[in-house]
Amino acid sequence: MDAFQKEIDERTNLTSSNKFELLLFRLGTPDGSTDKPGELYGINVFKIREIVPMMDITAAAGMRSPMLGMVNIRGQVMSVVDLPAVAGCKAGHGMNILLITEFARHTQAFAVESVEEIVRLDWSQVLPADSHSPGSLVTSIARLDSALDGGRLVQVLDVEHILNMVSPVKEQVQSPSPGGNEFRLKPGSVILAADDSRMARALIEQCLKDLNLPYVMTTDGLQAWKKLQELSQAAEQEGKPLTDKVAMVLTDLEMPEMDGFTLTRKIKASDRYKQLPVVIHSSLTGSANEDHVRSVGADGYVAKFSPPELAAMLRKVLPP
């Protein structure tokens, strides 16, 4: 038990150095051929509860692809998602493994062809997919090797998007009355938001629009940090406090280049920025993550995806 707890602590502490662990797996090939291995995909180990061999799946009436059915694992019934079908692949060697995942307050099983290994990476090795992949299901590209040329690449799936495909977010916030606004941000001040998931950005933007809150959206922690510095310089040149430009920072945890833990830590360590409220909005739930959120100085934590809860947190940290 001591060794097991030590391993958990070690993985949690990776966030102190902008590092994380990625589980690599394969889904097959576009045509289902077996003469070559399929492309590598990855998911953050923190989202994996366990890995089990394929078991009997009960097909539910009316269930359609990419849903395969349901499984019962130690008394918990959960849906099974055909991940190769979602990614446009065919598992030539069959779907042999179930990845039991917990994130965004959901538990589900992803069926995959095979599991390869767990690799430890620095977030600087992970590049945003927006400029590298036209597919909306890939949130980032990870370089597994130190070589700048010819190194192995792995596609990190946007599991938040996939979850929303099979279980769409239906909650909405109540918009202010026409012409009204419950928040009193300084004119020109914005919420600086960061998230690498296209689906998450869309949901965040809709929530902020519904609340009549101005915002600037970025796609990773490094981009958010640079934007914060830019806005800070603009405020200084105009002889204004930073809060005239930025009301608060809303950040995801898992992001290329710089994760949300590192972004929060840098903000709270700066005399110029530390008074800014920082709220972490993440699909990584659980007491270990929430404790670490507090340790880096964040002013709030809200789990994805519940627009009413996000709105409640904004009301808590923004000036009335």
Image (tube, helix red, strand yellow):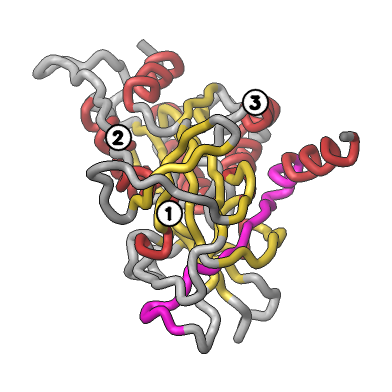
**Residue 52, percent across and down?**
62, 51
Q: Magenta segment range?
A: 13-33
Question: Which residue occupies the extreme top position in the image?
Answer: 320
Q: Please determine whether, in this image, residue 303 is positioned above or below residue 137.
A: above
Residue ID at (34%, 50%): 67
How busy is the neighbourhood of tag 3: few (under 14 within 10 Å), some, or many (20 plus)? few
Residue ID at (39%, 32%): 305
* Residue with the mark numbered 2: 169
Res. 233 in view: no
Residue 252 — which label?
none
Is label 1 in a helix, a strand or a loop?
Answer: loop
Residue ID at (67%, 54%): 21
Residue 158 — which label?
1
**Residue 194, percent across and down?**
44, 44
Inspect the image, locate mark 3, and give the three-letter code of the amino acid beneath it: Ser
Residue ID at (70%, 75%): 146
Is label 3 in a helix, a strand or a loop?
Answer: helix
**Residue 102, percent across and down?**
53, 38
* Residue with the mark numbered 3: 287
How busy is the neighbourhood of tag 1: few (under 14 within 10 Å), some, or many (20 plus)? many
**Where on the picture, by quarter, is residue 261?**
top right
